[in-house]
Image (spheres, grey):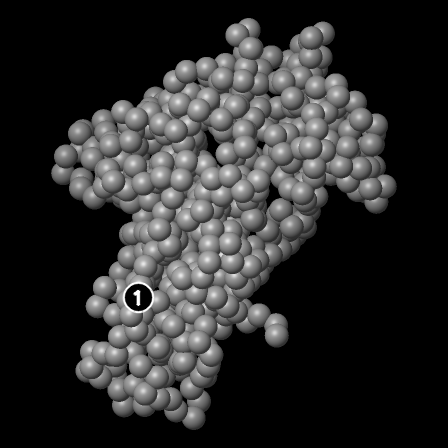
Amino acid sequence: MTLRILFLPLAVCLVAFGQPADLVLRHGKVVTLEAGAPVVQALAARGERIVAVGSDAQMAKLIGPKTKVIDLGGKTAIPGFIEGHAHFTMTGQFRMSLNLREARSWDDIVAQVRRAAAQAKPGDWIVGRGWHQSKWSKAPEPNVDGFPIHTELSKAAPNNPVLLNHASGHASFINEAAMKAARITRDTASPSGGAILKDAQGNPTGLLQERAQGLVTRAYAEWQARRSAAERAADLRKSVDLAVDECLAKGVTSFQDAGSPFETVDLLKSMAERGDLKLRLWMMLRASNTDLGPKLDQYRMIGAGGNYLTVRAIKKQIDGALGPRGAWLLAPYADLPADAPNRSGMNTEDPADIRRTAELAIAHGYQLCVHAIGDRANREALDIFEDAFKAHPDKKGLRWRIEHAQHLSAADIPRFGQLGVIAAMQGVHCTSDAPYVLARLGHDRAEEGAYVWQKLMKSGAVVGNGTDSPVEDVSPLASYYSTVSRKLKDGSVFFSDQRMSREEALRSYTIQNAYAAFEENLKGTLKVGKLADVTVLSRDILTIPEDEIPSTDVLYTIVGGKVRYEATR
């Protein structure tokens, strides 16, 4: 793709020409993603907004004695990355717990827990996240369905309950002390929409899938409740600050949060109104219909704190994830024996309950966002959306979303475009999951509907991008690279025909995500009048050799015309 630098007439480029700008970026390649001037040399901002785009000479006229001037030195500036689906406070909490992402064996994880237990007070919980059994160099022994037995973990921390969340967030592994706290025994039955994995003798192995995790999270919550309110509030605020810092360092200027409780919204609203939020948040509420109903009008907000906080969506989850075999499929998993339980995955929330949520969303002006990964889950979610739209023909352009949309039946792909449903996807999941996707689905089903970005776009659907952090690192550059390359660590490419072009991928991380949140008039491109949210990169990711994309650095992250992150030289 070739983008030409355009020099626009002064009247087109500049507004309020007589007043100096607060910020000027010059001597660079400024990718605006605007058709009239896709690439310019410079940009100026006053307050929170862009006031000019054009040539270096044109911007020079806006530089005053107090203007902050950044010489890009030929580097590339793009619209600020918008994280299209991730978990905000969890991104910070991940940095407050054991990081299991890089573990290459069950033994590595047990060793981490053993070290943590040596430092912990008896009775304190040890929490970690990020393990994935399909990414270990060898299967643990003994194991059940490829998952370990808790014995060694229980020995490593005999006096501390241990809760280790799967990378996907759709399974957890616990030790004997945590089982006791959660009152899980061989006689405990699996709850609806979840599973307690047991060995051949009927003893729990320590693995809890999907809604069975609630048994241990309740026990963990009981322990947390014994801590003071001040301690819990401090932890929540720390998770917010850590998440903000990490996002800014990786070029994220806006973050679409995939489901938080009312208490988290309360904190973020107070921060936004005080001017303490340094990046922009768009949030989905996650609560029961009983709790949502009376509070939806109270919590709906658009652009609070000067466009730093919007709450206008509801999150529901109809199935699990493919990694721990919780995604709800139309046909059984290819890598499970015929006598295995839950051979086609799990329905984690009753579709009838989600239909009631749909009515609440329409009545109160909310978007409905449904987590759906398996092809059965996506079909059910699309059915719910279609029925709601037919029941309310006067409601147009609702922009309801399916979060993930990872594995689709060919028959359902066109429905996204036909219904105007947003496919809120994560490019990095494709290359992260691909090594086991073929085993779970088989070649034909994977080719038909696994991460089919081009097929969806050809249906007319808007496809967003993100990371699902802390499932993956929140880095947009890593997900961008996965989106344009679909290249695995071994160098193979996962169904190359579904790759996005460089510009398509950049749009999926900027203007497409803005559209998915009803924010396309505020952000997503660099245009006079829009928010001055800009990410400056060390390389031009639109033109450099593909394999150089992962080594690109974020040099500046600018939110509302203020430099919120600057790389150390």
Mark 1, residue position: 3
Q: Which residue corresponds to the image point at 32% horizontal and 59% vertical from the top-left?
A: 1
Q: 12 and 261: which one is in front?
A: 12
Q: Hey, what amino acid is under mark 1? A: Leu
**Within the image, what quadrant is residue 317 found in?**
top left
**Within the image, what quadrant is residue 172 found in?**
top right
* Left or right of residue 38: residue 184: right
Q: Circle 1 sits in a helix, a strand or a loop, which is it?
A: loop
Q: Quadrant of the C terminus?
A: bottom right
Residue at the left extreme, as displayed = 394
Figure label count: 1
Q: Which residue corresponds to the image point at 50% horizontal and 23% vertical from the top-left?
A: 440
Q: 31 and 291: which one is in front?
A: 31
Q: Which residue corresponds to the image point at 69% horizontal and 25% vertical from the top-left?
A: 139
Q: Is residue 486 above or below residue 245?
A: above
Q: Which residue corresponds to the image point at 43% horizontal and 93% vertical from the top-left?
A: 65
Q: 208 and 81: which one is in front?
A: 81
Res. 389 in view: yes
Residue 217 rendering spot, x and y as whole percentages: 62, 31
* Left or right of residue 153: residue 73: left
How many residues crowd around disc 1 within 10 Å: few (fewer than 14), some, or many (20 or more)?
some
Residue 398 rendering spot, x and y as whole percentages: 24, 42
Residue 77 rendering spot, x and y as whole percentages: 41, 69
Q: Is residue 486 above or below residue 415?
A: below
Q: Is residue 38 above or below residue 144?
A: below
Q: Is residue 73 above or below residue 111?
A: below
Residue 70 rendering spot, x and y as whole percentages: 46, 80
